Image: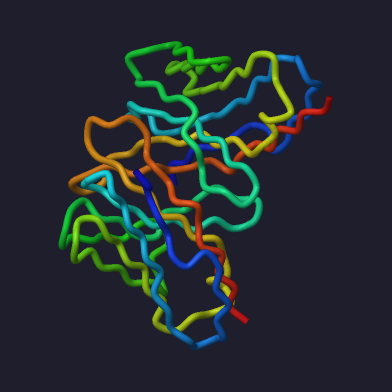
Amino acid sequence: GESVGLHLPTLSVQEGDNSIINCAYSNSASDYFIWYKQESGKGPQFIIDIRSNMDKRQGQRVTVLLNKTVKHLSLQIAATQPGDSAVYFCAENIYIQAGTALIFGKGTTLSVSS
Amino acid sequence: NAGVTQTPKFRVLKTGQSMTLLCAQDMNHEYMYWYRQDPGMGLRLIHYSVGEGTTAKGEVPDGYNVSRLKKQNFLLGLESAAPSQTSVYFCASNTPGVAGYTFGSGTRLTVV
């Protein structure tokens, strides 16, 4: 079946480094993608989103890149901080019946050491 | 605004018992969802609703039922709990034109 997946289950970086988390998706018809951050014991928290008519979108310290040719997403975190330690999920918005839903990848655990 | 509120936060059930998880949202969102999250995995869609009085099956619906009698509430029921339903359950809501989906803080359910 179609799914959204992440390339690496874990990523360890030093404080101050830039982090890049990757995600591959398989549904070429998907037109909306979201990155979520999940801290231990909490629900997913919206970070940034991007629509398929864009290649890049920037937020505060975060950038999402979308390559539709190879169906690849990445999340870049600048000057990574210990508070960025969490599990990061990419999610693909799909059309179902009369609405939409999110399909999640398995997640990448980011560990930031100071 | 409270956003999405889930109750209870924790629950332990014995095999065969039943229970209902409640999700409430105060954002007037049209769509609501129930997901489950197992260790090392992403969230999987159980059931969803695109409006009051409507429900539909997601990826992993077996063993669960849902109801959406009021727009702001989405109930997830387990009629006869099984150990395989031990998981963390998340509710989410969304509406057309609004960026992102809002998630609750989760219900940790253990079935023994």
Residue located farthest toward the front when viewing the structure as drawn: B1
The x, y position of residue B7, in whole percent, is 44, 65
Query: From the viewer's perspective, is B96 left or right of B84?
Result: left
Q: Which quarter of the figure has residue B67?
A: bottom left
The quadrant of the rendering that contains the C terminus of chain B is: bottom right
Q: Position of residue B79 (x, y in %)?
A: 39, 82
Task: Say above or below: A104 vs A14.
Answer: below
**Where does the image place residue A70, in percent across and percent down from the top left?**
49, 19
Q: Residue reaching furthest left?
A: B53
Q: Residue at x 30, y 56 (%)?
A: B48
Relative image position of residue B85 (x, y in whole percent): 53, 71
How many marks the image carries: the answer is 0
- Quarter of the image for residue B13 reads bottom right
Please report the residue visible at 41 percent of the width from the left and 35 percent of the height from the top: A92
- Residue B101 lies left or right of residue A35; in this view the side is left
Q: Is residue B99 above or below residue A58?
A: below
Relative to B68, is A21 on the left or the right?
Answer: right
Residue at 58% x, 41% y is A38
How is this picture coloured? Answer: rainbow
**Residue lying furthest right:** A114
Residue drawn at the location 32% of the way across and 57% of the way down: B24
In the rendered view of the protein, which quadrant contains the N terminus of chain B?
top left
Instruction: Answer above or below: position of A55 versus A20.
Output: above
